[in-house]
Amino acid sequence: MQTMHSYQIKLNGEVLQVGFNRNVPAQGDRIVKDALCVLNQMIDSGEIAGGERILIDGPQSIPVAYLISHRLVHLYEVVAVLDPKLGSKISTPVGAIRHKTYIVTSAHGSAKYQVGDLIPTEEKQPERSQIKVVLCGPPKSGKSCLRDGLKRAILGKLGAPYPYVITACPDGEGSWHQEAYENNQPVAQNCKCINKADVTPEYAQEAAKWVKSANQLINIIDVGGKTSPENEIIMQPATHAVILSGDVTKFAEWEDFCQSLELKIIAKIHSQLNAVEDEVLFTDGWQGKTNELLETTLLLTGSVHHLERGENLSTRPMVQALAEVLIHLTKC
């Protein structure tokens, strides 16, 4: 079984991307030990081989920053750290961007750089967009399970925004339910029954306020399984939709419903309880022509298998693909 580390490190060219694993909460002492473990593995394997310079991009606690610097200064002439506020802002037809700029924090034997020098790069740092994505579709499709797996998948991605979840259906399965189910299934099921209620017009108005005021970059809204006046009120302030259905004949009804609310439909996913694998189909060119494509088509289609309460669904290929799409949308 692969060990889950509380700190994540990935090398892309000369950029070392770092960050906390939000699926593994830990105190500072464990985070430092995990960061050292990952670094040592990368160094021992030759992935981090040393050289002229290395650029560090991502959140670090002070102890982790000291640790990373200590391990890398013996391997590289120059170590530099990203300052996201540096770099001139450039206006483009798709929004403002900066080119990432790094500050040299260590220079040993380099004739080119000194401590405090700036290293501008061609790597773009776009101003991120806010999205409000409704998970919708007929009842018993597995929307709540998909919601929980999707949140965990996004939390596990280096540099991804925090996914804020709104349970806009009083079905008794709030964000607490998955973890409660994993720890004590009878108690979770009992709490669900106690908390379950009808969707009233008053509830719909209140839930719509939650959606309207949500201000994270990724906001995920889980709604009930009816194309009802109440869901129309709740979904109105959203921006995008993902349709999940176990019955493919129900897709058209939900597509029409979302389009009537002027929501951009990101994905249409067939929920197959008894299947054994996912099918993931990206639209050609979806990353380069995202906004243009969303005017007329979907970015992602396919199927997800066995959305079952109590299982870790975050590693399913379709859940990972959907997480990738939502993160990408914040950069468009």
Image (spheres, rainbow, N blue to C red):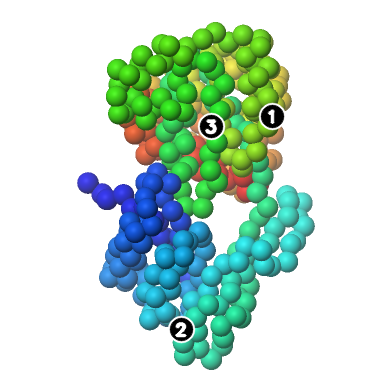
The residue that mark 3 highlights is 165
- Identify the mark at residue 134; answer none if there is no mark: none
Q: Which residue is mark 2?
A: 77
Q: Is residue 116 left or right of residue 41?
A: right
The structure residue drawn at horizontal position 42% and vertical position 33%, both measured from the top left corner, is 149
Instruction: Tell me the amino acid under the disc marked 1.
Output: Lys
Outermost residue, left direction?
1
Where is residue 156? Give x, y as percent: 43, 46
Would you say residue 275 is visible in this rendering? Answer: no
Q: CA distance from mark 2 to mark 1?
A: 50 Å
88 w.r.t. 78: above or below: above
Residue at 47%, 90% in the rendered image: 109
In which quarter of the view is residue 81 placed? bottom right
- Marks 2 and 3 sit apart, C-alpha to C-alpha, by 44 Å
Compared to residue 224, the image places residue 43 above or below, namely below
Q: Earlier in the sequence, mark 2 or mark 1?
A: 2
